[in-house]
Amino acid sequence: MRPLDGRPTVLAMTDLQSRLEAVLAEHRVPGATLGVLDGDEVTVYAAGIANQNTGVEVTEDTLFQIGSITKVWTATLVMMLVDEGVLDLDAPVVSYLPEFKVADPQVTATVTLRDLLSHRSGIGGDHILDTGRGDDVLERYLETCAELGQEHDLGATMSYCNTGFSVAGRVLEKVTGKVWDQLLRERLIAPLGLTHTNTLPEEAILFRAAVGHVDAPDGGQQVAPMWVLPRSAGPAGLINARAADVLTFARFHLDEGRAPDGTQLLSPGAVKQMQEPQIDIPDRFTLGDQWGIGWILFGWDGHRGYGHDGSTLGQRAYLRVLPESRLAVTLLTNGGSSFEAFRALVTEIAKERAGVDVPPWPTLPDTAPTLDLSKYAGHFGRLNVDIELRVDGDHLVGEIKQSGPLAEALPERDRAEQVEARPIDREVFLLSGASLPTTMPLVFFDFDGDGVPKRFHMGARAMTRRS
Amino acid sequence: MIAADLQAFVDATREELAVPGVSVAVLHEGEATYAFSGVTSIENPLDVDENTLFQFGSTGKTFTSTALLRLVEQGHFDLDTRVKTLIPELTLKDKSVEERVTVLQLTNHTSGWAGDVMTSTGDGDDALERFVALLADVEQVTPLGETVSYNNAALSVAGRIIEKVTGQTFEQAIRELIFEPLGMTHSFFFPNEVMTRRFAVGHNQAPDGTISVARPWALPRNGAPAGGIAANAADQVAWARFHLGDGCAPSGDRLLSEELLKSMQEPTVDMRGSALGDYVGISWLLRDVGDPPVRLVGHGGTMNGQHSEFLMVPARDFAVISMTNCGPNGPVFNDALTKWALATFVGVEESDPEPIVLGDAALAAYVGAYETAAVDVVITAVGGGLSAQITPKPETAKALLEDGADPSDLRQPPIALGLLPGDGDRYIVTDGPARGMKGYFVRSPDGTVTGAHIGGRMATRVGG
């Protein structure tokens, strides 16, 4: 039921086409499509360019990389096989993949698909590397996980884990005998009638496909050096789709697992289970406050919703669903400060179409809280990322350093970032830095008896104290 | 003036033939002239420009062979080296061929096994290794070293030799041996590289005139050494400059001795006037035209909906390059353009010989069923000439349909063949998009017709 409290008439509704164009310009986004599912009506708006070098304009049917929104598709495939009794969310992964191994033998023996799909396994999460472009890419990827350490104890908290979805993708391949891409085509893309959704460059190249853009040294945008991430990241983030197809996928979840032609692809129980909280997110501001199976869960103004974001090489995608209002909003972009662009648009659309207020971004209090900042100082880290926090007067400063194969593909200047963090309260700080278009919440947790935090959470990832 | 004439001819011919987009270059005495016309895609049209990438297909075989020769020059092996010594695991159905086949025979289409193996061995770095293993089950069609029968599979074996010797993937080795030293900054193998740039997509025109985008985009990765590169016109001109030159890169660095470079343009085997020309050199296809005869050195390529031609006249320091994004009219464009450019720039006229009309009794010798690994060919006598109906074999049809081909693509109209005067059982196609294509029949010592060389392949007779 949609609230009708003083809602303006249709005629007075915001002209989303001009709002999209204005917001993209304001946030330096080269091109985007905005899709809105309102009740049963789908509207897609397009603006800007798909590729700065060629000047190709974005149209409604332009393919964007939807990045990690793919994770919900992979989780859906898992649930389809759970429905069929082929997979059990609570069985150890190693029972399907005897060759699965991470550094911790206990985790190797006991981690489940439920842990992987809700990011609570603790396994080092940004293990993204090129294991070729062949159909054996996930099999080879699995072999590279044997030495991966833990960011936290299994199930203790959550830390965003791409690795878990590549492993889950390999489970799917093992039990079906089909590569992930093929399974996705047969189980979701074809039955949902998605004509503009695919996973491989040789498929995407025959559509109007957007390319990613990154910040250029002159302050503008430039085409990203590569089009796509390594194929091993497929189940974690390599779907290409147009906005309408993303909305069809969202609608399939709103319709309790029914395809547009009425076929029941996923049971209503499985759809519901994907929306049940599996773990709290310490940083409850950025994406949501809990994780389900695949879905990020959030509360806006007393209304529960689910969604996901995606980020690849210069392309970012966003999806938010408010089931009570039967409203879904997706924004697919190819550069610039798209997170801010999306927040601006979704805030207006949620208010106007559903009467729902998106919570404001956290801000610093007028007076800084009195804290012993020395308790927060120290070296924190996770796989491929390190930060040394120091006290500087009334705030913390530090340098975020990235390493690993993905960071090595970046210019030297982009691998380290000077940041400062100012406190809102005992747990929540706001991080700012030159390359960050806005502030990022940094949430400390796991305090010891002396009030010294063992971890903080940033960008849905846990950073653990090393000293 | 020359540039304006070229542009006018290209625009008019492209429009007349309804080809969506073309990229053309002429190189004469060191000076390049370009003409671009039309659009990259009818679905997402961009004007074709100097940076637009086209899949130029089988001319890529000359890249593979040039890379092999660079490795010969570096002393890794010779053209007469037996392939088995370089790829010890090579297993062929004919054990004698397995032991004897040489590097040269891979490059001049005389290895004799069925050359159109359409199987994909995946997109992994092991694609060529796995492809070579498949050859154990492939039939030997013609005797080793004697008959030219166009052979894509042999080039994939040549690509595997390059991998073995360099320790790199084929694509990386070509980058380092060819693209980088020749400054080819707009030549790419992988769609991942192509798609952030401006590129043409292929189209096919149905018999009713409807043009649609050709899917899928690429050949399987194992086909890369037989022709898997997309490039702009300038990089194709760089390739012509190199092969018209003395073996040095623009930087002055020597890539090949002049002798070895030129040896690629000398006949290594006689084709008797087939669809492909009179002789094969080292991958280059050669034919002599005009009076006095002048040697044409070239290649061409056919991808899914993209057709190209690459033709040099070394004696006149001339090359013409034509890349199109539509079939079957792209080859008609290429043919018209190259004929016009040869006549206009260097005064070389190539005229098709006139076929003769024969009675049914004389034609009966050729009438019958023939086959290659990929197609069935039925030849009948019609109106004083021959008619060839070419049908994909069921497994070929299945592979084509799985790759997204339209069922209507599999039912091509019959091709009219006219026999040419003189010895040699030579014929010429007299109608349709392949008009002007040549071929010949072969006979056993007792005079029975045993094969038809058609479209560059030897089709074996299977029945009366």
Image: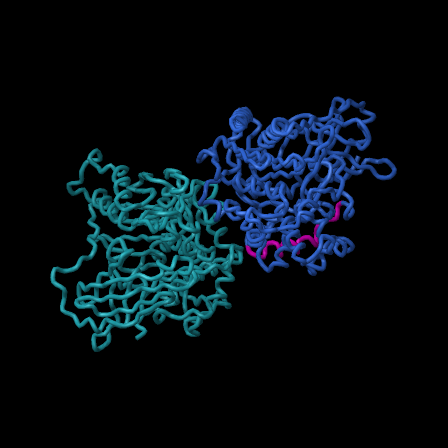
Find residue B352 and report its image quarter. top right
On the image, the x and y values in percent for residue A199 come to 46, 49
Please indicate, yes or no, whether residue A44 appears anywhere in the rendered image.
Answer: no
Where does the magenta region start and end? B124-141
The answer to whether any part of residue B288 appears in the image is: yes
Hue used for the chain lettered A: cyan
Q: Is residue A194 magenta?
A: no
Tell me how the rendering is colored: by chain
User: Which residue: 31% across, 42% down?
Assistant: A34
- Residue B198 appears at what percent x and percent y? 46, 40
Considering every residue shown, the one lying at the far bottom of the view is A449
Looking at the picture, tell me which residue is in the foreground, B351 or B237. B237
Q: Quadrant of the N terminus of chain A?
A: top left
From the viewer's perspective, tell me whether residue B190 is left or right of residue A302. Answer: right
Q: Residue at x 39, y 43 (%)?
A: A245
Provide residue A306's location: percent of width, then percent of height: 30, 53
| Left or right: B398 in relation to A131 | right
Q: Is residue A74 left or right of residue B202?
A: left
Q: Quadrant of the C terminus of chain A?
A: bottom left
Viewer-side residue, A83 vs B171 = B171
